[in-house]
Every structure is written in C-alpha cells, then in structure tokens.
Image (cartoon, coloured by chain):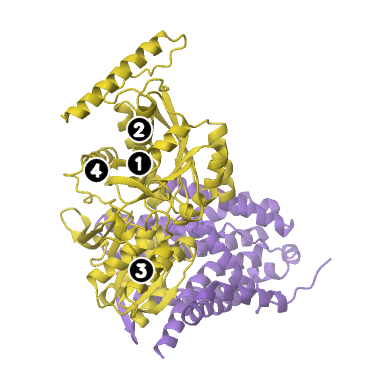
Amino acid sequence: MDRLLAVFLDGLIFAAWLFLVSAGLSFVYGVLRVLNVAHGSFYSLGAYLAATLVGAVVGRGLSVLLTYPALLAAALVVGLAVGPPMERVLLRRIQGRDEVTGLLLTFAVLLIFEDITKLVWGVTPWSADAAYGALGQVRLGTVTYAVYPLALVGVGAAVGAGLWVLVNRTPFGKLVSSVIADREVSAALGVDVGRVNSFAFTLGAILAALGGALVAPMISVVPGISVEVIIVAFAVTVIGGLGNIAGAALGAVVVGLIRAAALYFFPELDLFLVYAIMTLVLIFRPYGLFGRPEVRRI
Amino acid sequence: MGTRASRKLAFIWRLFAVLGLVAAACSPAPSAPTQPPAGQPKIPGAPSEIKVGLVTFLSGAASGPFGIPARTAAEVWVDKLNREGGIGGAQIKLVIVDENVPTDQQVVQLRRLALDEKVDLVIGYISSANCLAVAPVAEELKLLTVLFDCGTNQVFEEGRYKYVFRTAAHTGIDGIGAARYLLMVKPDVKTVAGINQDYAWGRDSWEIFIRALRKLKPDVQVLDTLWPRLQQNEFSGEISKLLSLKPEVVFTSFWGGDFVSFINQARARGVFDQTTILFNNDGSNIEEFGKDLPDGIIIGFRGPHWIEYPDPNQNPLQKEFIDLYRAKYGKYPMPHGSYHVVQALQGVKAAYEKAAQAAGRWPTVDEVIKAFEYLEFDSPSGRISMAIGYGHQAVEPAVYGITKLDPQLGFSRLDRVKVFPVKCVNPPDGVKTLDWIDQGFPGAQC
C-alpha cells in the first residue's frame, strides 16, 4: 500500500514537472506551427537565473520565503526578455515555411544559448536548494517527502487550469483558438495574427522558464539540461498530441506514472518504457491520444 | 642539507650542467634556455622546452568537479617546476586541449597533438572511455602518453602497452577500500542498496564494491540496485524507494551535479537519519558544500588526495602544493583531478631525470619509458610506485573516512580516517582486479 502511494506521489511530482515544460512547447506549436527546440534553452535560462536569485536572497541573509517570489521573477524576466525578440526577429521571417525550417532555426538558437549560459554561469553546478528544504517535510506512510515537490503538483495543476481558462473563457482565447483553427481565414477576418503569435510565443517562453525556475531547487543546474528537457518534453507532447494543452497534461501524467512504477517494479526499464509508449502512440494514433487527425489542405 | 652520497650526486650533476653549458655555448645554433636553471641540475643536451599536451575537460559536466581543477593544478605546478629549472633545464610548456569531444574525435585530437603541435608527450584523460580509446593510438604514434585520472581497471588488465602509463591508482581500490572500510565501521551490516549512474563508471564501481563486500561478508543482502541516467539530477522517485526499503547502507558512485543533487534531496527527506551513505569517490565538492554537507557520510578518495592526508607537516610537497594552490585560487585543492595531474607531472619529471642520469644526456623516448617502468617517485600524494600493469600502472593506498563538519574550517573534514596500505587494496602485478577479489584477495597485506 505504501509502495503504491509512493508510486502515485512520485509519478505526480514527475508529471507536474513534465507538464510545466511541455505545456508551453505544445501551446506554441498549436499557434505558430513551430516545434520550438529552443524551449529547452528558456528552461535552462530560467533555472540558472532562479539559482542566481535564490543565491542572492540567501547570501544577503533575507528570509528564505523570499526565494519563492524570486523563482517566479526569474521565469517572468527570462520569458519577457527572450520570448518577444525571438518571435519578432527570427520566427516571423519563417512564417508559413516548412516545419523543418523552424526546427533547424530553433535548434541553432538552442546551441547558441547553450554556449551563452556557459559563458555567463560557467560550468560548475549551481544550486538553489535553500528553497527546497524551507517548506519542510511531511511523512506519508513510511516515506518522508519534502513539501516543495508536492507543492509543485499544485502549481502544475494551477497552471493547467489557468491555461484552460485563458484559451476557453476569455476573448483573447477566442482569437488564439481561431488562429489555431485556421490562420488565413482568421487573418482575413481581421484577427491580428502577428500579435497572437507574439503573445503565444512569449507565454510559451514564460512557461518554459517557469519549469526551469521551479525545478532549479530540486536539481543541480548544469550545462546540458536544456537538451535533456526538450527530448522528454517532446515525448510527452507526442503522446498527448502536439498543440493540445489537455494532451500535454495527459501525456505528462502517463509518462510520470509509468516512470515511477518502472522505478519500483522494473528499475532497469524506466526510460525504455517511456519511449516504448511513445512509439506505440506514434504507430496507432500518430496525432496523439488527444489530437484529431488533420485534414490535409492542398 | 643531505647525505654525503647526495652531495656527491649533486656535484656530478653540476659538472654535467657546466659541460652542457659549455657545449651549448660552442654549438653554432645555441639552444640553451633563456632562463638559467634555479635549483635543478641541467641535463646535457636538454632542449630549451619540453612540450606537454594536457587533455582535460574544460567544458561539460565533468569539467567542474575534475577537469578545471586539474588544469588549475597543472598550471600551478608547472610554474613551480619551471621556476626550479623545469625538467633538467627544459622548461615545461603546456598545450591544453578540451577532452569534451566525442570518443572518435579524441583519437583525431591525439594525432593532431603529436603531428601538428609536435608535443613530446601527452598527459591526459579523465573519462575511462577516452583512456581505452586513445591507448592503442598512442602506441601507434609512439607517443608517450600518461593517463592521469581515468579510473577503469581495464586499461592494463585487458591490454599491454609500451608508450602508455597511468600515474594514479585504478578504480579497484575505490570498491575494495569501500567494502573494507564499511566492514570496519559497521561489522554487522546486513542490508545494502546501490544507486549508480547507468554507464560504465557506475556499473564498474558497483560490481567491484559488491563483489568485494560479498567475498568479505557473504551474508550481506542487496535490497536493490538503482540505475538513474547520468546527470539525471532529480531523484525524487529513487529516494522514495530507498526510504521505503530502508537499507542500512546505500553505496553510490555519483559525482559532480548528481552528487550535489542527491545529497541535497536526500538531506531534505531525512535519508541520512535512517541510512548510511557510502560514496566511493568524488570529494571535489566538499569545500563548496560549506556547512551543508551532512555528517556521517562515508567517503573515499582514490588514494591519499586530501588536504590532511598525507599530513602536510610530514610531506613538504603536499604542503607546497596546498600553499601554492591556495595562494593562486583562494581555495583548497580537492580530490581528485588536481592531485592526479600533479602526480603525472612528478612521474614524468622523475622518469626523464632517471633516464638522463642513466644515459648521461637528454634521453630518448625509449629510454624514458625504460626508466618509467616500475619507477617510484614523490608527489603531494606521497610516494607513488608504478608497481603493477607490468610497471605501467601506479598503486596507491586507499583513504576512507566519515564526514564531520569543522566549524572553524567552514567545511567538513574527515573523521575516523583509515588508510588501507597498497597491498591491502591493489591486486599484485599481473592479476586482474575481479579475479583477485573472487579468489579471496590472495597475498593481501592489511
């Protein structure tokens, strides 16, 4: 029983992290039709800036509770500083081109940012663990959990709900939905597609940076995390259906629970199972569990 | 000052040096060094400089804990050696290249060092995979290559090389030392678990440790072995499982970012209250942890590479190394890249000087190799002996201890230190590590 509880909780914690990093990726793909590999860079920048700010807060002897607003600030600063210029300067130029162009362009951006982070932050691990321990521990069954990762589950759920409300219940969400459905017709009807794109891309960047900032207290921030995260986020979005927020949530929960269960029952297979599921989904439902088959327009 | 014999030796060296200077002055193209040798006698016919390729991680995950400290220590130590006259009058010039390239590129890089840079020798390699890849190529290039840090015991157990040496102990002493130390501090241990990175280093570390432990205490039960990815960094699930299994001891070979993350996450979840964690190697982050490293962690270094072992008051080279390193970088040298690279430099210097003494002039590569085999030399890590691998592989004692915060120092020092003598943890010459373990450590002297 304890073991099942642990699998469930560990699975949810992992799912929350996966959802935070893949929701933005999926959203940006839905609106801009660009598979943004540089999403991993936003994640890594968020993590590094968060570690820096947490270090500054703790170093100044301020209350450790101030580290939590610092994490959010890191996400906003990175998203707002990097998202709009990148959309404006780079992505707008390749609008309407083949999806491969966007993939290559954003991959180049990822490599550039990888070296920039090394120049700015060096290569030794950065840690923001002050924020991890400060919320205390809780004993569930026989296993002690830190409260921080459990709180992350709440944050993941809140972000998911917020995105759903934004897309489905606000006037701006209607514009976003119309661009997702048909870019040309929306433009013809007077929707400012450029503005929607810019907004969607910035939101995606903020979400990526938020994922990085919130996970920073749980990891050592090192070079290379940008590439790792983009691979697993890609698997999650493929399972759920690219461009679909609910799909990203479902994909995250599926992958999170599978990985946690594998760790307990077949520890040798944890990665294998995740990608095996992805492969099965690609074979039987190439548009993802939540996606709908697309009608090809000529 | 010294014994009569050493004074006589010094006189002979000086005589050689004078003759060498005269010869150099007479030759049409003078190759005498611009800087006169300060403390060391000059070897006749010594070139003005000796070019040493240094291959170490300057980027990537292994650069922080091992690669950059190794470069730093190499620069500090080469400065010192050059101030004292280099190697027999030849100034050491480092050509530093990044090890962070794919294994196939590594071989290309070694060729470039030999053919384009025309280095006299290479000191290099932290990754075991790279050591295994470059050794045959070094042989082909007839390039003296001193492996300084990589751990795998396979290099000289599975291969035999003429041009390749390793001046640090291999990883056998990590696992055997860990098993022996564990049974010393916890003789009644019943249950262990392992959490190691899922690649060669993690798998080999666990294999050597658990085989040695089972040989020494057959009733030990392994509750679980976990294999997270290299640089996974996030161990919520693994820690939950360890907490629910409650092993008495968890063995891990984590290093770098994984080492830091695992300790931080395990500490926040009370792992240290119920389980003893045993790290077989990395101590490179101990100073950076400051006051945050929990007490009671068993930690080992592959040899005496710790600021208190060897005792700086007994070993002048150790004291000098720590002082020089701190003066330049404001930090202590941490195990193990920094100590290992100095061992390599000391070994190379000793081999050249021994060969020169035998030849009476600057030695050829073959003469240096002959002198290097079964050589003994002094270093900040104590006296190193190239005793196994047919004289190409160094042996060192294993050092294990338990962390305990020293508030005055500002970080943890080692408590209950045990230094296992060379013959207690190293297989004899020509015997493979795993065979030695399985045969029950024949000839071990503890």
| Disc 4 secondary structure class | helix
**Residue to which mark 1 is pinned:** B375
How many discs mark residues in the rendered view? 4
Q: Which amino acid does label 2 sit on?
A: Lys
Distance from the alpha carbon under mark 4 to that under mark 3: 35 Å
Give the numbered dot on residue B318: 4
**Amino acid type shown at disc 4:** Gln
Q: Colour of chain A?
A: purple
Mark 2 → mark 3, Cα distance in angstroms: 37 Å
Above or below, B117 relative to A113: above
* Residue that sits furthest to the bottom in the current view: A1
Pointer 2: what residue?
B354
Q: How far from the left and from the top, in percent, is residue B377?
A: 31, 40
Q: Which of marks 1 and 2 is nearer the N terminus?
A: 2
Identify the image quadrant of the C terminus of chain B: bottom left
Q: Distance between the residues labelled 4 and 2?
A: 22 Å
Q: Which residue is drawn at 33% across and 28% down?
A: B82
Chain letter belonging to callout 4:
B
What's the CA distance linking mark 1 and mark 2? 9 Å
Determine whether the residue tagged by mark 2 lies in a helix, strand or loop: helix
Nearer the observer, B430 or A19 = B430
Upstream in sequence: badge 4 or badge 2: 4
Q: Tell me the quadrant of the picture where the N terminus of chain B can be found.
A: top left
Find out whether the residues at labels 1 and 2 contact each other: C-beta distance under 8 Å.
yes
- Check the image and report above or below for A149 versus B425: below
Chain letter, yellow in picture: B
